[in-house]
Image (cartoon, helix red, strand yellow):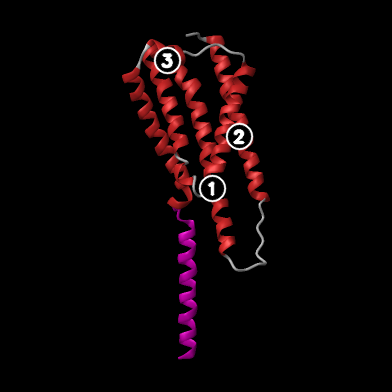
Amino acid sequence: MQEEDLVIFENDIKKEKKEKKKKKNKPSFDFNENKSIIYTALFYSFGLFIGAYFYKISSSDTLNSLLKPEKESMLNLFISNFCIYFSLFVLVVFLGFCLIGYPIINIIPTVIGIVTGIKSSYLYLNYSVKGIGYSLVMLVPYAALLLTVLSFTIKLSSQLSKQLISITKNTDEHKEFNIKPYIKKYLLLALCITVTALIDASLTALLFTVVTI
């Protein structure tokens, strides 16, 4: 009986291992791990709708004069874009790291969506097909890249915040916290912000040399 019990026990262990392997191989979607990206996309989409509707009801010569794109040098465009994008990056880092600011962090993708929605509606309603082309070249790339970087920044900041909280609650005095990996990731994201500003400036400057509005 002992040998039979041993065989049964070994078979159970093998079954458990197989089940674990199957679970690992199955693609699973963890909402908690990706909620920052999901929320960013949702609030950005909400902002797009608000921006498009706002322009539709508030269209005027004054607003159009503010929205009309003007030809600038690539350097000026890059500097302007970089200052705006990097400021948003720093704000997201701060709000994501600060527990008090984290609940309101989704205001940023909402505002980006509103601005993009207003500009897209202006270009489409005033320049038709040419306006659609401008939107695809000038607005879509920067919005997609910027939102991607900001969503990963939110995720990283929230992870850092949670880890610091867990350390403060932990009574183990010998537990060490290594911030270097986080700094490296922040520097990489800052580089991505710079590249985004450069791509946006390059596309806009190139477009103005081909088509004018």
What's the residue at 55%, 18% (across, down)? 204
Identify the secondary structure beneath mark 2: helix
> Sequence order check: which comes first, mark 3 or mark 2?
3
**Depth check, front residue: 96 or 145:** 96
Q: Main secondary structure of the magenta part?
A: helix
Q: CA distance from mark 3 to mark 1?
A: 40 Å
Identify the secondary structure beneath mark 3: helix
Task: Provide residue 60's location: percent of width, then percent of height.
Answer: 36, 13
Q: Nearer the viewer, mark 2 or mark 1?
A: 1
Three-letter amino acid code of the residue under disc 3: Gly
Three-letter amino acid code of the residue under disc 2: Cys
Q: Please indicate whether residue 154 sits to the left or right of residue 177 in the image.
A: left
| Residue, far front | 100
Q: Please indicate whether residue 154 sits to the left or right of residue 122 in the image.
A: right
Three-letter amino acid code of the residue under disc 1: Cys
Residue 194 got which mark? none
Q: Nearer the viewer, mark 3 or mark 1?
A: 1
What is the span of residues highlighted in magenta in the rendered image? Answer: 1-29
Q: Is residue 9 magenta?
A: yes
Residue 98 got which mark? 1
What's the residue at 58%, 29% (across, down)? 196
Q: Is residue 61 above or below residue 197?
A: above
Q: Is the residue under label 1 in contact with that under label 3 (CB below 8 Å)?
A: no
**Depth check, front residue: 97 or 33:** 97
Q: CA distance from mark 2 to mark 1?
A: 23 Å
> Sequence order check: which comes first, mark 2 or mark 1?
1
Residue at mark 3: 131
Q: Is residue 30 visible?
A: no
Q: Residues within 10 Å of mark 3 (few under 14, many from 20)?
A: some
Quadrant for the N terminus, please.
bottom left
Residue 192 got which mark? 2
Identify the secondary structure beneath mark 1: loop
